[in-house]
Amino acid sequence: MRKCFERRADYWKEVPSFTSVFHFKWQPFSRGLHFDQLCHSQKQMLNHLEGHAEITTKDCLFKNFLAYAELNKLNAFDYLPLTFALDIDSPTYGADFEKFVYCYSTIDSVNAAVGKDVPGRDQLCLKQINQRIHRIAFSKDRRVVSHSRAKLHPTHFTGHNLWVLKPTGFNRGVGVSVFDNMDKLKAMIKLYSQEPASPMTDMGKKKPAAEPPLDPAIKQAAADVPRTRTFVIQKYVERPLLIHGRKFDIRVWVLVTHELKVLFFREGYLRTSSEAFTMDSAAIGKKNVHLTNNAVQKYCDHYGQFEDGNQVSFPQFQVSFGRVDRISGRDIWTKHTRIKASTCSGTSCRR
């Protein structure tokens, strides 16, 4: 951005960041921007939309889609993996966390009760799990019927119990961790949410009893995360669609104007993992296996080995994989458009 403006030095002049007299202000984050103080006598532009957190933070995005589903009498979990938004400072934190614990424990107990050699085991377990967790409603108002009920899809259960913890308000895979036991989850939430120890404030205080050492993977994850007290817990897709045995995600550009018009760009791309997908417990802590963010993958030894920059265009996907999986770029575009339209519509449903 700076280079673009410097090439137009005859039209643009840089001013101190603290001044209130400007025509255009650009900064990576919206933190510190005061939309209510913009001048109305002259045009002032910012590179952030007011209230954008409603769709750019993980917890608000989920809550908005949940509200949209309720308004339209839909079950949000027909479209989303089973998801829980947690706010440690919320009075409903305990009840919200217990909903997750119930679902997690139900999967664990059914998994243990059904023999490993039973024919059609995964389908049988899935049926029993859904019968039990369907009672979990996501409406805050108990006086109304909740259309969003907890459910698992066949691709979300293959005999394991994997979940993803996502600190909200961050991107690039920061702090995102896969877990399969409750102790690890509680340790991560505690580590992420507590304030860093200060030598000055801790002077003279009695040292607490020694706690058991933390899992190195948890320590590493916490080291990369600014502290937060809000999280999203989401069921891991245990049977994902793969490209040559590796995970991928789909990225499409969307332009939102100051008039809140939404424009979709038809060309997108797929981001791939550098390592083969596995559900092996030893690989749970390997981000290169489970997260396809470029910020994560670029540090992998195999980055760029299979695709240039770990990216695949829609036409490349169509040629290489569409014939096998019967999935077309048009299918991707159509479904993505519906999802984005529903996401944008959901922001108007938030109360």
Image (cartoon, rainbow, N blue to C red):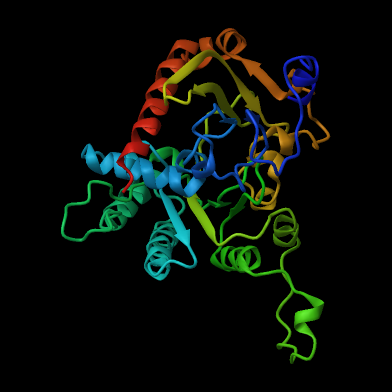
Q: Quadrant of the N terminus?
A: top right
> Residue 157's x, y, as percent?
45, 45
Q: Is residue 68 left or right of residue 27?
A: left
The structure residue drawn at horizontal position 38% and vertical position 67%, both measured from the top left corner, is 92
The structure residue drawn at horizontal position 75% and vertical position 34%, both measured from the top left corner, is 15
The structure residue drawn at horizontal position 42% and vertical position 57%, both measured from the top left corner, is 107
> Residue 284's x, y, as percent?
65, 50
Please tell me whether residue 252 is drawn above or below residue 93 in the rendered image. Answer: above
Picture quadrant of residue 301: top right
> Residue 219's x, y, as percent?
74, 62
Q: Is residue 317 left or right of residue 199?
A: left
- Closer-to-camera residue (274/257): 257
In the rendered image, the residue lying farthest to the right is 301
Q: Is residue 119 something one can see in this rendering? A: no
Please tell me whether residue 107 is drawn above or below residue 211 in the rendered image. Answer: above
> Residue 142's x, y, as percent?
20, 61
Number of numbered callouts drawn: 0
Q: Is residue 2 left or right of residue 242?
A: right
Please tell me whether residue 13 is drawn above or below residue 19 in the rendered image. Answer: above
- Closer-to-camera residue (214/110): 214
Q: Is residue 187 something one can see in this rendering? A: yes
The structure residue drawn at horizontal position 28% and vertical position 40%, both measured from the top left corner, is 69
- Closer-to-camera residue (112/269): 269
